[in-house]
Amino acid sequence: MKYTTLPNTNIEVSKICLGTMTFGRQNTEAEAHKQMDFALDQGVNFFDTAEMYAVPFTPETQGLTEQYIGNWFAKNGQRDKVVLASKITGSGRGIFNSMRDNLDFSKSSLDDALDKSLARLQTDYLDLYQLHWPERAVNIFGVRDYNYNANKRWEDNIGEILHRLETYVKEGKVRHFGLSNETPFGVMRYMEEHRKGKRKMVSIQNAYSLLQRRDEIALTEVLQMENVGYLPYSPLAFGMLSGKYLNGKKPEGARVTMFPNYSRYHSESSMKATQAYQDIAQKHGLTLSQMALSFVNDRPFVTSTIIGATSMAQLSENIDSINLSLSAEILKEIDVVHAAMPNPAP
């Protein structure tokens, strides 16, 4: 395994982070525990979860992922071996209303979310606590274009949010804070408040893959200039970049087969680009998964790549991607495809 330091902290994290959102829907608790055992044995010391998991969300399965992780800690006493990250659900999506009366980042919501996450995780603290998405309306989760009229009623409360979050550091409940599904504007507003004396957001977790590289357009400059960590999720684009959905295939037990609404990477343009990347991988004797993950792992702005798997074979291959570096020839061929079909998935 390879390691790096989470920016603005003294926390060493593995370059591969174990994503856990399948725990509780596609993976049983026993399977979840087996995944965590294996990941830790392979040197993965960074686990990411969220209060809303498992995914897809239902009121009945909400919190199960954190509960499974907490039971694993209680069973093996390995909390001190893991850098643990979780997230509070953002506002604006009514499907999550069963979680609390107000889906926002008010003090009451933050208190409720954090205390329940700590209880489920059976820990006294989180190493990284993230805002799952902004209270503003932003073009994320398969939305390509920004809605210019959507934020007319939004009142900037970012300084207030940071003030609330700082209390958890003083109480010993959280070590550091991060963002998720944020935009360059949002990150810079948090940096502006940091310059006024507030604690710094140390990382951002966004979707990034061969099919979705739009953060390179503006956000990566912010990451470099402001020294903010980048934690890309969906590096295999919900399994599309394993090649298993090509030619109309619907593998039994696969996420998009089971949950067709998770098909934002299945457009005609995404299929075409995926086939082109598959051809490159096969030409060089690689699996598409290996190539896609290695590409993400080696981006200079990436702190740790969040992987996810439903089988142990997938997990092993995903973790092993850290040992592969793509040749200049492969990277050049990837650039040719990207130039012809940039960001085919919104």
Image (cartoon, rainbow, N blue to C red):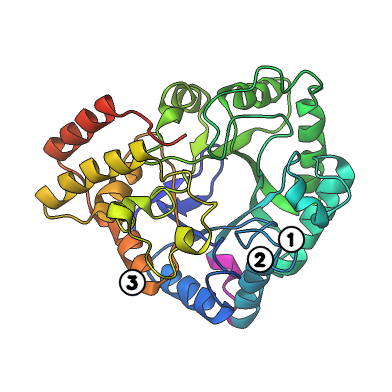
Res. 313 mark: 3
Q: Residues within 10 Å of mark 2 (few under 14, many from 20)?
A: many
**Front one among 135 and 187:** 135
Mark number displayed over residue 73 = none
Percent of width and height locating residue 144: 52, 29
The answer to whether marks 2 and 1 mark residues whose Cβ atoms lie closer than 8 Å is: yes
The residue that mark 2 highlights is 66
Secondary structure beneath dot 1 equals helix
Q: Give amino acid for label 2.
A: Glu
Choose top left, top right, bottom left or bottom right for residue 193. top right
Q: Whole-Å distance between the Cαs marked 2 and 3?
A: 23 Å
Residue found at x 85% / y 40%: 106
Say above or below: 24 vs 53: below
Relative to 116, residue 262 above or below: above
**Would you say 177 lies left or right of 22 here?**
right
Q: Residue furthest front?
A: 248
From mark 3 to mark 1, how far is it between C-alphas?
Answer: 29 Å
At a point 81% along the width and 58% down the height, the residue shown is: 115
Indicate the quadrant where residue 320 lies.
bottom left
Seen from the viewer's position, the closer of residues 52 and 78 is 52
Nearest to the observer: residue 277 or residue 160: 277
Q: Are marks 3 and 1 in contact (CB under 8 Å)?
A: no
Callout 1, which amino acid?
A: Ser
Q: 255 above or below 233? A: below
